[in-house]
Amino acid sequence: MKSASNMPFKKIFDIYNWDDVKKNINSKSAVDVEKALAKPKINLDDFAALISPAAAPFLERIAARSRALTIQRFGKTIQLFAPMYLSNECNNICTYCGYSFDNKIKRKTLSDAEIIKEAQAVKQLGFDHILLVTGEANATVHVDYFLNAIKLIKPLFSNISVEVQPLEEEEYAKLHAAGVYSILVYQETYNQEAYKKVHPKGKKSNFLYRLETPDRVGSSGIHKIGLGALLGLDDWRADSFFCALHLDYLQKKYWQTKYSVSFPRIRPAEGVELTQDVISDKELLQLICAYRIFNPDVELSISTRETKQFRDNIIRLGATSMSAGSKTNPGGYAVDKESLEQFEIDDTRSAEEFIKIISQQGYDPMMKDWDKAFTT
């Protein structure tokens, strides 16, 4: 699975200085953007140009190229999935999350019967691709809990993805053997100083352990790895550059693995005051389209954090995977609809409503990712 290169990502990461990266992006000119757009294949420095302030006047051209590349590589299809939250218990203090340990709220972890009931509700919505999500509470929601949940829902779904706390390589191997298709793990922010401030307590405060998680996933043989940064924790351009650097490294090292990138913008949540500089809609569109030009084959995923207007427009411009009808609380579909959400969603339309929108734009809504049977 691995290429000849065995250099750990930390060594590559340490070559770059956050402030220098930020300065480089902000110093890009219109000439740099033109040069990037003239190339058939762009590099990381070209990507920096396309996400720079200088690229804003070129948004129409960037979006047009992104659209053409997306249709060329993926056709007119949008893969749909539903997140299913198993638990809101968490041992970390994260200043941007409703599940933060210091929020004195009712905690809930689904029992076996509740997992089955919730999964059946998701299945009835038409989904065959499900994403299991939990808070990070190692004593409660651990690998054995995940394996049990997977066993319970596996008869209902052809494709199971997981977004939980960072695990060890052997634990990821167990998930892979149990039938998990993809693992999503977001660095949140690649700025180490900012990371310390927003993760003051808990295992998640270990920046390096989280940074090395995709390597452990790649080594375990998981079919797909999902990356991303929480846009709004720090400078979105610098964070996105480091995320692209991480993606580039992983693709070279674990070249048989598929990859996806998500673009979560920080959202209101229980106990959270939004004081950060959040990326605008136009800037987010610019970023998504720049990613497509940088990496034509990567899956680009958009959640219901975004407004219905933005989601409707991004269908044609670069997105390939989108959630729909999402609930971000454990039991939110059927078991306990009033339990605490991790964050507020914006697009509250049902899956059926969103499917109609996709079809009206001439795209095919796919209710699951590619079946693992096609890759064995």
Image (cartoon, rainbow, N blue to C red):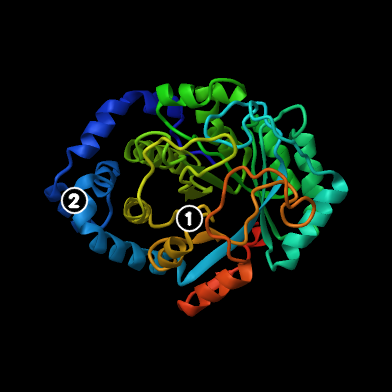
- Which circle marks residue 298 in the picture? none
Residue drawn 21% across and 51% down?
55
Give the crowd class for mark 2: few <14, some 14-19, many >=20 residues within 10 Å: many
Three-letter residue code for mark 2: Val
In the displayed structure image, the side of residue 363 where residue 236 appears, left or right: left
Task: Give me the C-alpha separation between circle 1 and circle 2.
Answer: 27 Å
The picture quadrant where one finds residue 316 is: bottom left
The picture quadrant where one finds residue 155 is: bottom right
Residue 144 drawn above or below residue 10: below
Residue marked by disc 2? 33
Which-is-in-front pick, marks 1 and 2?
Answer: 1
List the single residue furthest toward the left. Answer: 31
Three-letter residue code for mark 1: Glu
Q: Position of residue 144 (x, y in %)?
A: 79, 36
Residue marked by disc 1? 306
Q: Quadrant of the C terminus?
A: bottom right
Residue drawn 80% across and 44% down?
110
Pick the front one: 295 or 362:
362
Question: What SS does tag 2 mark?
Answer: helix
Q: Position of residue 304 (x, y in %)?
A: 54, 56
Q: Quadrant of the N terminus?
A: top right
Pick the front one: 91 or 19:
91
Dot 1 and dot 2 residues touching (CB under 8 Å): no
Does residue 99 appear anywhere in the picture?
yes
Does residue 152 appear anywhere in the picture?
no
Q: Position of residue 210 (x, y in %)?
A: 54, 29
Q: Earlier in the sequence, mark 1 or mark 2?
A: 2
Question: What SS does tag 1 mark?
Answer: loop
Pick the front one: 152 or 268:
268
Pick the front one: 255 or 147:
147
Residue drawn 72% across and 49% down?
338
Give the crowd class for mark 1: few <14, some 14-19, many >=20 residues within 10 Å: some
